[in-house]
Each structure stands twice: as C-alpha cells, then as structure tokens.
Image (cartoon, rainbow, N blue to C red):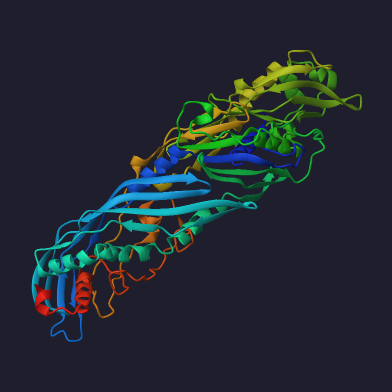
Amino acid sequence: MTRRLLPAIWTVATLGLSSGLAQAAEAGATVDQGLAVHLPQAGLDAVGEAVARVVPQALSVEASGGELACADDDAAPLTWALDALDLLISIDRVALTPADGTLDLALYGTLDSTDSTLDATGDCSVFTDLEEACGVRLPTTALEAHMALSLSLDGDAITVAAADPTLSLSPIGNPLSDCTLASAVGSVLGQDPLFVSDLLAGLVEPQLAGLGESIEAAAGDALTAASLASSLDLLGVQADLTLAPTLVEISDRGVVVGLGGGVVPGALSTCVDAADGAPLTEAGWPVFGATAAGSSLPHHAGIWLGADFLDQALYNLWAAGLLCVDVDALLADAGLAIDAGLLDSLLGGGFTDLFGDDAPVSLVLVPGTPPTAVLDDDVPPLAIDPGHLQLELWTVLDSREVRVFAADVEVRPGIDLALDGDTLRVELLLEPDDIRLVESYYEHIDPGFSGGLTGLFDTLVPSLLPDNPLLSIQVPAPLGMQVGPLTWLVSDDGAWLGGFLLLDPTTVTPLAVPGCSLDGVGCDGGGVDVELDLDTLLGCGDAGLGCDGASGCDGGAACAATGARHRAARAGRGRLLVLLALMLGVVGRRFSRRDVDRGERSS
C-alpha cells in the first residue's frame, strides 16, 4: 500500500457518502439513483412528538394597564389594570400524515390560563361609574391547527409549497367572574358563543399569516443545498462531482428524497483500458418500508447508498488514472529513496549481481481492473475491493527495459461509518497485516521476494495512515432531537446499503417565547402589539435548533419573521384583540348598538 493509494481510497469512500443507479456504464456516465433519505411513518411520528414537546407550554401576559376611550360622551375614560397571567398551552398530539404528495401537519391541544384580576374604574359607553375587580381565567378550550406542505420535482430542483396554517378553537366560555362586566360578557356569549374564541383568534391568526411563505423559503433553501456541482483535483487528476435530486415522494411510505449524480473525469488516462465500462446492477430504487432493509428492525430514518453509484464513481476515478501510482516518487516524498542497493537488501540479495549497483529502478502500481464497492451487514459496512492491482519493478538490462517482478496486491480496506453522538465519523480501517503480496511474475529473480517488500509496508503504511477520521459530518436532527445508534444493512438484492437510526423526541426543550403586554389597548384605534418571534419558533437565535447564519436566521429566507397582517375579528373592530382588556370596549359597543335602557343593561 502506498501513500497515493490511501488518499485515493479515502477520496472514493468520501464521495460514496454523498451521491446515486446509472443508465449507462461507460466512463464519464453519471447515475440517476444513488442516494436516498427516507422518513417512514414512525419517523414522522417521532418528529410530531418532538413538535408537541417543543411548543411553548405557556405564554406570559405581563401586568398591563391603560385607559379606554369607549365613547365620545364618556365622562371619565375607563382606567383598567390586568394582573399578570399565563396563557397555558397543552399539546395533546401532533400528527404528520403523508398522502398523495402532501404532508399534513395537524396539531391538537387545549388552552387555558392561570387566575388573574382585572380592575376597572370610570366610564365605558353604556357602563358608568364602574369600580370593579373581576376574576379572570380563560376556560379550558380545545384547539386544532392544520398546515399542508407539498414537494414536487421540477427538473433537478425541488419545489416546496406550504399553505398558511388554519386554526380552529372550540367555543370559549366566560373568562370574567364576580363583576358586572362578567354578566355583560355572559349576555354577549348567549348571542354569540364564539365571541371570546374570535377575540383569541384575532391575536393568533395574524401571526400565522405568511408563515407558509417562510416555511417554503426555509425548506427550499435546505433542499437546494442537496444539489452540488464541484470541481475536484485529486492528486493531479481533474474531475467534476455533481449531485441533484431525482426523486421526491410523499406517500403512505413516508417522505423520500432521492439524489443522483456522479464523478465525471476531466480526461481519461492512457494507463488503463476503460473501454468496457463498469458493470452495474441497475436494480432501481430500494424498497422503502416501515422496517429496515426487509428486516424486522424498526427505524425513524433511513439513509440509502447505492452500490451502482459507488462502483461508477470508483470506475470513473480509476479511468482517470488515480490509481496509476509511481511508487518511487511517492516514497521519495516520504524520505525513502528506492535504489538498486536498497532493493538488493529487500529482495534477499542477487539483484545487484544481475543488474549492477547503479541500475535504474522503477517501482510502480498498475491497476489492471477497476475497483468496486463491497457492502456488508457486518462491521465495517463498506469496503473497497481495488480490483486486479499489481506492484511491478522495472529496470534496465542489456540496454532494454525489463520487468523484474510483479506481485498482486491483495487488500480490502474497510470504511467504518458510525455515529459518535451527533457526528458521523468516517474512518479508514487498514493495518499493515491486511496487505498481502502474491507473487505472479519473477523471470529475473528467485521466488520468495515478496517477504522483504511486506516488511517495507510494515514500516511505511502506519506512517501514511491518517491519525484522525477521514471525515466527520454533523448530523442535524429535527428540533435538536438526539440521534440513536446507526445500524447498516444491505438490501436483499445487494444493490443498496442502508443506514437506519432512531430519533429521541424526549430530548427536545420547549421554546421560550417572550411575553406580551396589553398596555395601550383602547377603543379609539389603539391595538395590541403582540410579537411572536418567528425566528425562535423556526429554530433560530439561542434556541439551538439547527439554524445558523448560513441558513438565513440573520434575516434570511430560512427563518425570516413575517409581519402581522391585521384581520377583522368577528366580534370586534378588526384589531389584534387579546384576552380581556379589549372585551371591555367590544362589549360596550355591542350594548350601545342595542336600544335597551341603561338600567336593563347595567343590571
């Protein structure tokens, strides 16, 4: 094994982690079916559970106060003060249901609040000389929210369409008690059971407007990152790496995104004969099921890697001459000069007697057949078979170049793919003892010469192996869930290697949403400026849910906050109405529209 061969194996293994089944096997061809990511229903359920856990459990409403100018003829504006309370949110279930190209997110839960007190003094339209302390508590009410997300393939790009969420609230009972205003609200609820529900919807619905566009942008940015076009310079061999979506599916099998592409050499090398092309299985996409690779093993997510893509990438790199290695130059870079004297010692004597002390020597690695990928259920799950690889020694005898010996290099380096916490570590598994030389030609030398060369590898290979993993990849998990062990299995047809893992939704932390205040609410055009930090809800800021500057959390599309769009609330004047302070103005105006005497109203 030489220093040049080792980086080649590393490069091939690394490329194999990121791409797709080929239509043609000739050199330079790419593949359409190579890498796939699959979330079965169990995985969607785990994501749904995480969403339920990450939704804030409470929204604080700070102690608030202000004046209400409910009518022009009010003798004294109504002064009100609301003690602090918490709006309590309980999410019972979040369901993600895939069907016919659309993923429906449904959220079911309840709302209620802690106890508080509302103090009101002064006039408000039909109410005069108020001096009241009302008990405040939002009765438990059921909520249901739905959102639809669809994915489609447009050429080699994935188009995301997300609808704004819809919110439904069950009729909310009277949140006031022990005061005249409570009786008034009760009368209104008798006429309109959705009165309080619409007030609350007036707070929430404007904050949801535009959320679909933000999710489209965020998902679109993430999926665009799956496409890749990059130029490679691998030890002087020029090639291009391409990767793009070729499959998008949302069905009863779950969510599947498939990628295709490959490594295209800039030029073919004359050191190998690449006319035959690479034999491929053309087995099609793997079977995406609820269990792992036809076994009984449940999983939440699967990462599928196609053998055809690996073999075609290996073939293209081989055809570009990556494994045609001048061992002399490589050893010289390592400070080991190969000359006739050293070879005489390694081969057990006799070399200089025949060729002379000053004979020029050339030790080369000749890749006769292309390498292929070896998939295995065991550890390691991936290995590289270098094909027919020969180590040859050439020198000059009687003014002509002759081959002194040839030895087949038998080695199968393993590539370990394992999760260490939230990091996928890709490591080369190779020891000097794993390399075996089989003497295949020795016209000018006695058999048994390979023993000394093996000793050379014992010294050389450890110094050439990397001390660290070949590659460390951060594995993002939805909402910061911890990722469980990664199990690799080969498909029944041997054409795919699948990595299967579990997600732990119990490890997520509920988001902390800033509280709001009702200060400044009034009937004279005043509104409530309630800010829900959409960046935080989408995982930006300090929540640590996977966004960073590159993905748009600093004002970019991935986590862009949307401005509130005011909608007319059914019960009021079309402002962002929240909880009880606005009820005063709305109740007063409703009663003022009724031609009933003040005594009946105030009773």
Figure check: 220 above or below 195? above
For the residue pair 532 and 28, the one nearer the viewer reads as: 532
Work out whether residue 64 can be spotted.
yes
For the residue pair 328 and 32, the one nearer the viewer reads as: 32
In screen coordinates, is 122 left or right of 400? Answer: left
Figure check: 257 above or below 113? above
In screen coordinates, is 277 left or right of 200? Answer: right
Q: Position of residue 437 (x, y in %)?
A: 70, 19
Q: Residue at x 51, y 39 (%)?
A: 253
Which residue, as the protein is rendered here, is positioned at the far top? 447
For the residue pair 1 and 176, the one nearer the viewer reads as: 176
Q: Quadrant of residue 24?
A: top right
Q: Position of residue 194 (x, y in %)?
A: 27, 63
Q: Quadrant of residue 599?
A: bottom left
Q: Position of residue 83 (x, y in %)?
A: 15, 65
Figure check: 399 above or below 125? above
Work out whether residue 3 can be spotted.
no
Q: Split into 4 quadrants, where in the image is the C terminus?
A: bottom left
Q: Position of residue 569 (x, y in %)?
A: 32, 69
Q: Split into 4 quadrants, where in the image is the N terminus?
A: top right
In screen coordinates, is 305 left or right of 582? Answer: right
In screen coordinates, is 472 left or right of 193? Answer: right
For the residue pair 98 and 224, the one nearer the viewer reads as: 98
Q: Residue at x 69, y 28 (%)?
A: 386
Which residue, as the protein is rendered here, is positioned at the far front? 595
